[in-house]
Image (cartoon, grey):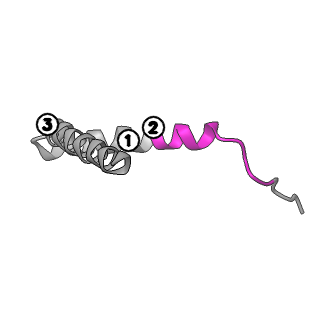
Amino acid sequence: MHSDTHLLMHHLRAAELETEARAALPREPRELRAQLGWILVELGLRLTQQAPRRQARLA
């Protein structure tokens, strides 16, 4: 029964996130482009904050 409760909680949270995402969607194409731009900036910042997994070799 525990797994059923856990699964139900995941479904409820997924529904909440979907509702929030739909509410946050921009209504105009300009807003969409700006929002996508900021998402890419955030992604770039996150990638630069991660430690490199291997060192580059200099020739």
Which residue reaches farthest left?
Answer: 27
Which residue is disc 1 drawn over? 39
Give the secondary structure at mark 2.
helix
Q: What amino acid type is highlighted by mark number 2?
A: Glu
Tell me the residue at 21%/38% (across/down): 16
* Residue that badge 2 annotates: 42
* Residue 23 screen position, x and y as percent: 14, 37
Q: Nearer the viewer, mark 1 or mark 3?
A: 3
Q: Residue at x 54, y 39 (%)?
A: 46
Q: Residue furthest right?
A: 59
What amino acid is labelled 3 in the image? Answer: Ala
Name the amino acid, label 1: Ile
Q: Would you name the residue on which mark 3 appears?
A: 23
Q: What's the residue at 19%, 44% (across, down)? A: 15
Q: Quadrant of residue 5?
A: top left
Side of 45 where 4 appears, left or right: left
- Report x, y in % for residue 53: 74, 52
Mark 1 and mark 2 in contact (Cβ < 8 Å)? yes
In the displayed orientation, state which residue is furthest to the front.
1
Which quadrant: the C terminus?
A: bottom right
Badge 3: residue crowd in 10 Å (few <14, some 14–19, many ≥20): few
Please tell me how crowded label 1 is: few (under 14), some (14-19), or many (20+) other residues with Cα within 10 Å: few
The residues bearing labels 3 and 2 have C-alpha atoms spaced at a distance of: 20 Å
Q: Residue at x 42, y 45 (%)?
A: 40
Image quarter of residue 21: top left
Question: How far apart are labels 2 and 1 at the CA level?
Answer: 5 Å
Horizontal and vertical percent for residue 56?
Answer: 81, 56
